[in-house]
Amino acid sequence: MAKGKNATVFFCQSCGYESAKWMGQCPGCRQWNTFVEETITPAVKAAGTGKRIGAEKRERPSLLREISLEEEDRLTTRMQELDRVLGGGLVRGSLILVGGDPGIGKSTLLLQVCRNLAMDGREVLYVSGEESLKQIKIRANRIGEFNDHLRLLCETNLGMIEENVRCARPDVVVIDSIQTMFHEGISSAPGSVSQVRETTNVLLQLAKGLNITVFIVGHVTKEGTVAGPRVLEHMVDTVLYFEGDRHVSYRILRGVKNRFGSTNEIGVFEMEAAGLKEVQNPSEFMLSGRPEGASGSVVTCSLEGTRPMLIEIQALVSHSSFGIPRRQTIGTDFNRVNLLMAVLEKRLGLSLGNCDAYVNIAGGIRILEPAIDLGIAVAVASSFKNRAVDDKTIVIGEVGLSGEVRGVSMIQLRVQEARKLGFTTCIIPQVCMSGVKEITGIRMKGVKTVGEAIALL
Ligand code: TYD
Ligand code: MG
């Protein structure tokens, strides 16, 4: 792309796709109406091709055996849930993006992290571009006592922030939020793709150059008026998304990218009057309020990273009063549910063709793991036949197109979790029977097909 003086380009505000002309649909992320014109100033060019991060440190190529790993000391945030998602604590010099819908609790989480780090004697700087010092103080009062290692700064000018950080040399910096920050060298408005990219670039150099851990808050917006966190995903070390329904009190922190640990780990929190509280036992939490003896309710076990979590699947199948049956899913894959219903219809002869069906994962969590297939199939069949499944039974397995039940990973962990929460029977794939050791207090039954599982129940 030719960049003359005051060249303008169009950026997709959702994924950052760059184009010389305007387009209705973004070829990158398939979103509509997300292109916005932005002026490219030479500063952007300089940032892209100019000094490399930490260039002064890496003059000569190194041998693998010369690199010591001891430097990678991790700071604990004193929140087990967060530490786990981060892969065992905060890595010094890393850049962490925390994304999520507005109002989900990002500022609260980070203020709590700041508090814990400050308690451990780390110097922390919290930069807010959204709230006044008074507003932060009000939030802090709800959370608890703070000590003097935490400093607050209300500033949106990145140059000033950079100066502050270079003088004070804190251990951890929080930028809340990246969409409010601006770099003087860029003419476009704060929140635009080029601003967000450039400010992140500066923060990246600060983090790596001074060995400071930097948290960046990024709002996810659907309207596309502000550049979303996805634009930054490739630049940062770790991407965490804070999910949940604003109307439900618990929140899930999910690792999407992590250069220092596994992704797929989740942390579960609950929003309370005094800030976020960790939920150590999410299974118990997810199953609270489960109806007893109701048809269409089945408990299964899903694995998030290394963590088993029991969830309740609810299905409601009713006769359709219109020509075209309605199907709806909340918390799981719509197409997968349709497929499972087709399997039930074809292989078991359940006439679901003229039935409305609604499938819901209770508690507002979203699960796409195939290991819950058998649970969904059993829940649909249970609702269809209007017969309840035993309360103390859990159902695990993936279902294939010919109605066979296929194996799932880490079956032992899942069964143990079920045992912990007082379940007495476990329906698992036949192929997994050999891989699971006897656990006292729980009976295991292997099944080969969906039909067998349904007959057992
Ligand atoms: P906030 O952290 O401001 O969200 P974000 O930074 O992601 O936009 O928190 C938003 C909500 O959390 C707000 O609606 C109020 C609620 N909240 C509590 O329920 N308890 C608390 O102690 C705090 C601080 C906030
Ligand atoms: Mg906030």
Image (spheres, grey):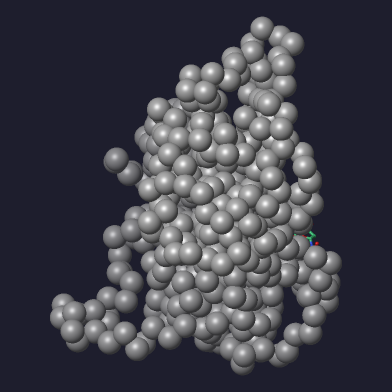
Q: Front-most of 401 and 363?
A: 401
Describe residue 199's horizontal placement relative to residue 357 as left or right: left
Residue at 66% across / 32% down in the picture? 382
Can you say whether 201 is above or below 345 in the image?
below
User: Of 69 and 9, which appears nearest the observer?
Assistant: 69
Please say whether residue 8 is visible from this viewpoint: no
Query: How far from the left and from the top, in percent, is residue 197?
Result: 46, 56
The quarter of the image holding the N terminus is top left
* Residue most extreme to the top: 323
Relative image position of residue 33 (x, y in whole percent): 53, 30
Judge by depth and name the residue closer to the eye, 409 or 20. 409
Task: Identify the residue shown where x is 48% and y is 76%.
Answer: 88
**Residue 357's quadrant in the figure?**
top right
Q: Residue at 56% of width from left, 52% of height from top?
A: 426
Q: Nearer the viewer, residue 251 or 234?
A: 251
Residue at image point 62% right, 76% down = 79
Ligand 1 occupies quarter: bottom right
135 displayed left or right of 50: right
Locate the C terminus by quadrant: top right
